[in-house]
Amino acid sequence: MQLRYNFRLYPTAGQRLALAKAFGCARVVFNDGLRLRQQAHEQGLPYLSDGDLFKRMITQAKKTPERAWLGEVSAVVLQQALADLNTAFRNFFASVSGKRKGPKMAPPRFRSRKDTRQTVRFTRNARFAITTGGKLRLPKIGEVTLRWSRDLPSEPSSVTVTKDASGRYFASFVVETGDEPLPEATSQIGVDLGLTHFAVLSDGRKIDNPRFLRRAERRLKKAQKALSRKAKGSANRRKAVVKVAKAHAGVADARRDHHHKLSTAIIRDDQTVYVEDLAVNGLACTRLAKSVHDVGWSAFVDMLEYKAARYGRTFAKVGRFLPSSQTCSVCFVIDGPKPLSVREWTCGACQTTHDQDVNASRIVLAAGRAERRNACGGTVRPAA
């Protein structure tokens, strides 16, 4: 399994300048390649192959006065920029032809120097290295100070250097990790995700919704109000933009930390985890969009999935059209639809009183068990 390990970088002033050159050169090569392919398409010429594009955008471009400065950065950075362009075109063509599942992919777009996120990637061909002193040596940039929060499990195959909107630099290493199975547990859990509670588990536990964005709204509003009063193009406006970006970065970091801690606890304690497959994109188009984006369900479910695969646990999603709020988890009789304001109800068949969220998580667990196959190939049905 391939995973990414992210660490904070602290480049010096000279190294920040060298990284800015690398960001700019990669962006220019990407845009030049995209423009060349668009012009060939408009003129009815054959599609430029990856090899021809590489020769024209890097090898030949460096010999021209207009692009001679491309030689100031590592060639691997330029190669990876074209590799990203080629991947974007392949994904677009596969989506148009129906070979790629999921939502339709848009054609590649030009990159802007005003983008809030700038990245460059170094592979092993660039001969990046981690020094004995714990620094990251990058070609034509130097040894950059790195804050190590954990050890790398194996030799990294590539590293991506990123600058975010708040001016922070990060190094993201791609490493190959083996499975680390945990001691087998006996418990199985169903997880019902919501807004009132972030997650309700089938054993009755309720995880409060931290509402990181809602709690930071006053601070964000103050920073954005100060930004709106700064003159465009001024130094004070640039400082205000960074201040707003840092506030948003703090919210995102807190949310990610919460997701990691909760997903790790669930995977560590339970052998099998079932989660309802929510239509997050559809919910994000409703009046609940701000709250839906605040909880970050998709990122949390992705963490559960890859951690389950790594630590030898079973993870599965159940259908999103499951009537979990209408079905009794004791007798499995569908009791009919109920408004969202009803948080507790009594089954008309067995007279069992249910908590709405706990009952839904137990239905998710029962549905997940029913979809699994036993050793003889038959379905595993929950006991009535």
Image (cartoon, rainbow, N blue to C red):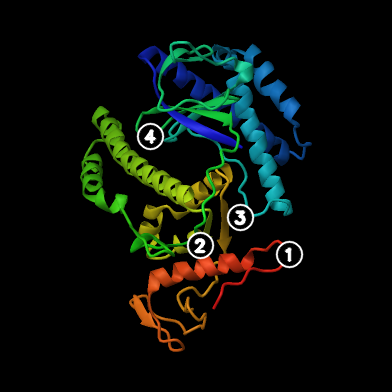
| Residue ranking furthest to the right | 46
Name the mark on residue 376. Answer: 1
Identify the residue at horizontal 56%, vertical 54% (top origin). Answer: 315
Q: Amino acid at mark 1?
A: Cys
Secondary structure category for the residue under label 4: loop
The percent position of residue 221, horizontal first and vertical second, equals 23, 48
For mark 3, what is the residue? 103
Identify the residue at horizontal 33%, vertical 76% (top origin). Answer: 341
Which residue is nearer to you in this view: 362 or 319?
Answer: 362
| Nearer to us: label 2 or label 1 | 1
For mark 2, what is the residue? 278
| Residue ranking furthest to the bottom | 348
Q: Which part of the image, by quadrant, shows the C terminus?
A: bottom right
- Please indicate, yes or no, whether residue 177 appears anywhere in the rendered image: yes
| Left or right: 316 in relation to 256 | right
Q: How far is the residue under mark 3 from the one under mark 2?
A: 16 Å
For mark 4, what is the residue? 165
Secondary structure category for the residue under label 2: loop
- Please indicate, yes or no, whether residue 35 appears anywhere in the rendered image: no
Q: How far is the residue under mark 4 from the one under mark 3?
A: 27 Å
